[in-house]
Image (tube, rainbow, N blue to C red):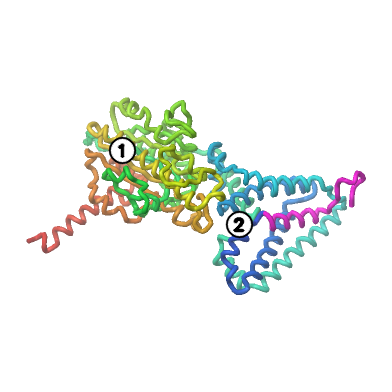
């Protein structure tokens, strides 16, 4: 029915719900249906099962909207859900990611520069066509007046009909749905906007539960050996989005580590990250908890390895060219190298190499004691890989020179990404050169580890941040490299190298960092210290050599 001006229609609340649920199911769930097609299109009755799932998704979305949307808030709630679904659809359709709680943690920790790399013309098209345009139409349509009794009755009929249809479809194909729930959990995570809204609810609940955080001290008994008169200088380079299998040190066919191969570095080839996003992995790398014990709330409320080293008298400095330390360096000196004010190596963006500027002067000012310096890289952060390296490192061509990965070939994306690894190789080599300059005064060590990996289009997946149980090795296998200066005598490099292919993880970093400084503390676990394991390996090899008949002759 038209109104008196002939410009606006009237709909019942049920019509609003039916139309919105249908629109969301049909247009905001491309990733859901695309992944369904990959899984079921070639199976017997695959198309019928996909149609059944589409109807169940529509009914489930309708139920969801019915529970949230009552007349006073009907339009605002539906418009909010349309906008949420439009943004979620863009990221799921474009990068095949899942919007879960961990992804929201990562989003909230992202700075404006990283966010800008994700805003493309396609993003605004999604927001406009799937969010703003249908929202404008909904806003223009009037809600048909009805009594409370009539509205309640019609709503119950709508909900009852959706439930009955869903139950009938599930019962008709009970064997299929049993297998779907049991074996294809990942597909359900693509349901939009159901999964993003649920993730937002969980995220908000967690933040409210945390409230004001009181940080508990750990390792206050930490100390270094009084008999040790040698000073340690350790630089830890915290990598960003680097894949282990794209390092030529680890067997990658391309020469992405031409400089590091000239040093006696030890590259660990089988290292697992504790997360698939910076906001999860970085705190996890430095905290005392293992991956299976980790939670953001526990990390926020507990001191980390930087604090323990501080208790032991180690001077700690954090330099950041990424978004921030994710809370790790909240109680340590931190310097922001994302602007030319501190970073002299800035062009299109500030370069990781600039974090080495003035570092020698800082080292010289520390008259006594051991030193730990953490350099947090921008590294290989996507999707704008082409921004992550200076022009002279554009070696692998042609490259994807846009943040719209869908407009580039897989080869162009890989070329741009490999150039970022090539630049990281340069930064690490320059770090080693700085340490070599300090060899006469210190026992020097460089430790490099990336926070997580990156998908480059394999199986249609891009970037990172998938739930850990679903994430491919490309997102969870990370490079880790150790270099020892000529005066570091607390580790046998031969024994360490023999462990380079053993399975390690971010869980080992806390204890290995303490081991590098020879820190004793009740929070130190020698069994998780890579250096301590190498000492055990060295002892075992010596004992084995003693027992062999050849050695006794």
* Residue span colored magenta: 1-27
Q: Which residue is under mark 2?
A: 31
Decide: is 435 above or below 182.
above
Residue at the farthest right position? 4
Q: Is residue 483 visible?
A: yes
- Dividing the picture into quadrants, the one containing residue 342 is top left
Task: For mark 1, give the secondary structure.
Answer: helix
Whether residue 56 sits left or right of residue 183 in the image: it is right
| Vertical side of 476 occupied by 115: above or below | above
| Mark 1 Cα-neighbour bin, 10 Å: few <14, some 14–19, many ≥20 | many
Q: Secondary structure at mark 2?
A: helix
In x, y percent, where is residue 505?
Answer: 38, 52
Proximity of marks 1 and 2: CB atoms separated by less than 8 Å: no
Query: Residue at label 1?
Result: 432
Quadrant (top left/top right/bottom left/bottom right) for the C terminus: bottom left
Q: Residue at x 63, y 57 (%)?
A: 30
Is 154 left or right of 425, judged from the image as shown? right
Q: Residue at x 56, y 40 (%)?
A: 115
Q: Is residue 9 magenta?
A: yes
| 300 to 276, vertically: above or below | above
Q: Residues within 10 Å of mark 2 (few under 14, many from 20)?
A: many
Residue drawn at point x = 81 percent, y = 45 percent: 140
- Cα–Cα span, label 1 and label 2: 45 Å
To which quarter of the image does residue 116 belong?
Answer: top right
Q: Position of residue 341 (x, y in %)?
A: 46, 26
1 or 2: tag closer to the N-terminus: 2
């Amino acid at each position: 029915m038209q109104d008196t001006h002939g410009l606006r229609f009237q709909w019942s609340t049920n019509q609003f719900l039916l139309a919105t649920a249908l629109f969301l199911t049909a247009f905001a769930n491309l990733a859901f249906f695309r992944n369904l097609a990959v899984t079921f299109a070639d199976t017997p009755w695959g198309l019928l099962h996909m149609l059944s799932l589409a109807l169940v998704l529509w009914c489930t979305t309708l139920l969801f909207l019915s529970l949230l949307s009552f007349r006073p808030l009907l339009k605002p709630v539906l418009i909010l859900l349309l906008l949420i679904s439009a943004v979620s659809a863009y990221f799921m359709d474009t990068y095949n990611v899942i919007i879960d709680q961990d992804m929201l943690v990562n989003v909230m920790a992202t700075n404006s520069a990283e966010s800008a790399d994700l805003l493309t013309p396609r993003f605004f098209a999604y927001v406009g066509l799937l969010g703003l345009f249908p929202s404008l139409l909904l806003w223009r349509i009037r809600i048909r007046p009805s009594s409370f009794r009539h509205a309640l009755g019609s709503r119950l009929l709508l909900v009852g009909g959706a439930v009955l249809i869903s139950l009938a479809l599930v019962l008709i194909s009970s064997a299929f749905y049993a297998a779907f729930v049991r074996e294809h959990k990942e597909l359900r995570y693509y349901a939009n906007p159901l999964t993003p809204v649920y993730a937002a609810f969980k995220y908000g609940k967690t933040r409210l539960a945390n409230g004001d955080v009181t940080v508990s001290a750990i390792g206050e008994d930490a100390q270094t050996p009084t008999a040790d008169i040698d000073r340690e200088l350790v630089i830890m380079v915290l990598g960003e989005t680097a894949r282990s299998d794209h390092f030529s040190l680890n067997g990658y066919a391309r020469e992405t580590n031409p400089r590091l191969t000239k040093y006696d570095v030890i590259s660990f080839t089988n290292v697992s990250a504790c997360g698939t996003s910076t906001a999860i992995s970085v705190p996890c790398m430095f905290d005392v908890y293992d991956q299976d014990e980790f939670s953001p709330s526990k990390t926020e409320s507990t001191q980390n390895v930087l604090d323990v080293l501080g208790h032991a008298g180690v001077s700690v400095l954090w330099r950041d060219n990424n978004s921030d330390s994710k809370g790790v360096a909240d109680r340590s000196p931190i310097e922001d190298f994302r602007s030319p004010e501190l970073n002299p190596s800035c062009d299109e963006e500030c370069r990781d190499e600039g974090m080495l500027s003035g570092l020698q002067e800082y080292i010289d000012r520390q008259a006594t004691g051991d030193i730990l310096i953490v350099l947090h890289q921008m590294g290989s952060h996507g999707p704008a890989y082409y921004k992550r390296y200076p022009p002279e490192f554009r070696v692998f061509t042609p490259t994807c020179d846009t943040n719209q990965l869908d407009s580039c070939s897989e080869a162009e994306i890989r070329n741009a990404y490999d150039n970022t690894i090539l630049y990281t190789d340069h930064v690490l080599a320059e770090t080693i050169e700085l340490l070599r300059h300090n060899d006469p005064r210190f026992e020097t060590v460089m430790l490099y580890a990336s926070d997580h990996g990156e998908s480059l289009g394999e199986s249609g997946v891009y970037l990172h941040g998938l739930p850990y149980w679903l994430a491919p090795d490309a997102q969870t296998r990370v490079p880790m490299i150790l270099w020892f200066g000529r005066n570091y005598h607390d580790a046998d490099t031969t024994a360490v190298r023999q462990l380079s292919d053993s399975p390690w993880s971010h869980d080992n970093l806390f204890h290995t960092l303490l081991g590098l400084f020879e820190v004793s503390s009740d929070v130190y676990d020698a069994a998780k210290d890579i250096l301590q394991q190498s000492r055990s390996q060295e002892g075992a090899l010596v004992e084995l050599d003693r027992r062999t008949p050849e050695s006794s002759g």
